[in-house]
Image (spheres, helix red, strand yellow):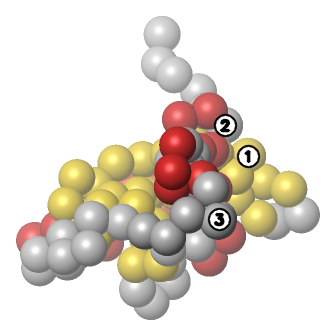
Amino acid sequence: MAKAFTTTVFAANDLIGGDSVYLGADAWVRDISMAEVAGDPAEAEALAARAALGERANIVVGVYAVDVSLADGTPWPVTRREQIKASRSTTIPVGPAARLDVAA
């Protein structure tokens, strides 16, 4: 049985900086709310083809689809892993790095 289609955006890593980025209307963007959303399989195929162009042009690496839900038209990942990436909060300062009164 085929998996039911889920609203999708395309993610990758910026080749130079390594940041998580999303395929936007005109460029790769850091903010998932600016990502181009595929609402059906045909749109997903078209976005996948555009995303692959970014990989071939050495702009991004590791293109993959991210299942999202829409809240007021804004995409948000459905999995916790992708939510963490989209929030851009992947580290928590601990030890001396967490103390503001200690010079680095």
The mark closer to the camera, 2 or 3, is 3
Residue type at mark 3? Leu
In the rendered structure, the answer to whether residue 24 lies left or right of residue 50 reads: right
Q: If you read the primary sequence from the N terminus, does the residue marked by circle 2 or circle 3 appear first?
A: 2
The mark closer to the camera, 1 or 3, is 3
Residue at which label 1 appears = 69
Instruction: Name the spot of residue 66 as percent of width and height, x first.
Output: 50, 46
Q: What's the distance in space between the residues labelled 2 and 3, CA to CA?
A: 34 Å
Q: Residue at x 27, y 65 (%)?
A: 18
**From where the camera sits, is residue 13 visible?**
yes
Q: Secondary structure at mark 1?
A: strand
Q: If you read the primary sequence from the N terminus, does the residue marked by circle 1 or circle 3 appear first?
A: 1
**From where the camera sits, is residue 6 visible?**
no
Specify the label residue 100 is tagged with. 3
Residue at which label 2 appears = 78
Residue type at mark 2? Val
- Total labels: the figure holds 3
The mark closer to the camera, 2 or 1, is 2
In the rendered structure, the answer to whether residue 81 lies left or right of residue 70 reads: left
* Disc 2 to disc 1: CB gap under 8 Å: yes
Direction top: furthest residue: 1
Residue 1 position (above or below residue 89) = above
* Disc 1 to disc 3: CB gap under 8 Å: no
* Disc 2 to disc 3: CB gap under 8 Å: no
Direction bottom: furthest residue: 26
Q: Residues within 10 Å of mark 2 (few under 14, many from 20)?
A: some
Q: Residue at x 77, y 65 (%)?
A: 74
Residue type at mark 1? Ser
Instruction: Name the spot of residue 41 as percent of width and height, x first.
Output: 50, 48
